[in-house]
Amino acid sequence: MLGEKLTALRKKQGYSQQELADMISVTRQTISNWECGQGAPALDKALELAQIYKISLDDLAGNNVEIVAREKVKRDNHVLRGLIGKTVRLECSDFDLLLEAGTDLGNSGKVKVLDVNDEWIRIEYTRTKENSLFQKESVINLIEMSAIQGFEIVEEQI
């Protein structure tokens, strides 16, 4: 899972493995190994990666955090910052992105906004656990800000 995150984050930023390796003073093969799940970055390198990608070390390393990224578009996100701590329904530019983020019809698209920065919106929601009919699990997603087209504030909690 960490390898998939590292690959998604690198590609989202548009870096080659070599460019990223040069930025954090490792070899291209080291980056490749991390992305293929054949090892993981040491804490100091993981911290450098988190800083490059503008996410927390917890979000980079956490098994309960999934990365949902699309192509980068710069815009003013000050309104979305006001949603931190609120339960909302998000409108995304891509229906498949909503499904990847788990905000399908079973959850009515309701998510709690945990954090917002220029690159990401960090959300939490509850979904039915895989291979279970009744067990629920809490999931945290990082969604690329360029994918967010709108929102609706919801009164009830998720």
Image (cartoon, grey):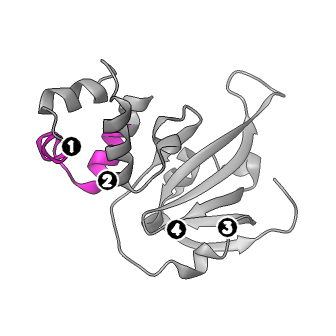
Question: Tag 3: residue type?
Answer: Ile
Percent position of residue 32, x then y: 21, 29
Q: Is residue 17 above or below residue 143?
A: above
Question: In this orientation, does residue 127 appear?
Answer: yes
| Gap in angstroms between the C-alphas marked 2 and 4 | 22 Å
Check disc 3 and report the residue beneath it. Answer: 84
Give the mark nearer the N terminus: 1 vs 2: 1
Left or right: residue 87 compared with residue 144: right
Disc 2 secondary structure class: helix
In space, the residues marked 3 and 4 are separated at their CA atoms by 15 Å
Residue at left 75%, top 66%? Answer: 86
Visible residue check, residue 93: no
The residue indicated by pointer 4 is 148
Where is residue 95 shown, x and y percent of the image? 53, 56
Which is closer to the viewer, label 3 or label 4?
A: 3
38 up-or-down from 42: above or below:
above
**Do tag 3 and tag 4 residues touch (Cβ < 8 Å)?**
no
**CA–CA distance between discs 1 and 2?**
9 Å
Point out which mark residue 61 bears.
Answer: none
| Residues at discs 1 and 4 in contact (Cβ within 8 Å) | no
Residue denoted by label 1: 24
Q: Nearer the viewer, residue 135 or 64?
A: 64
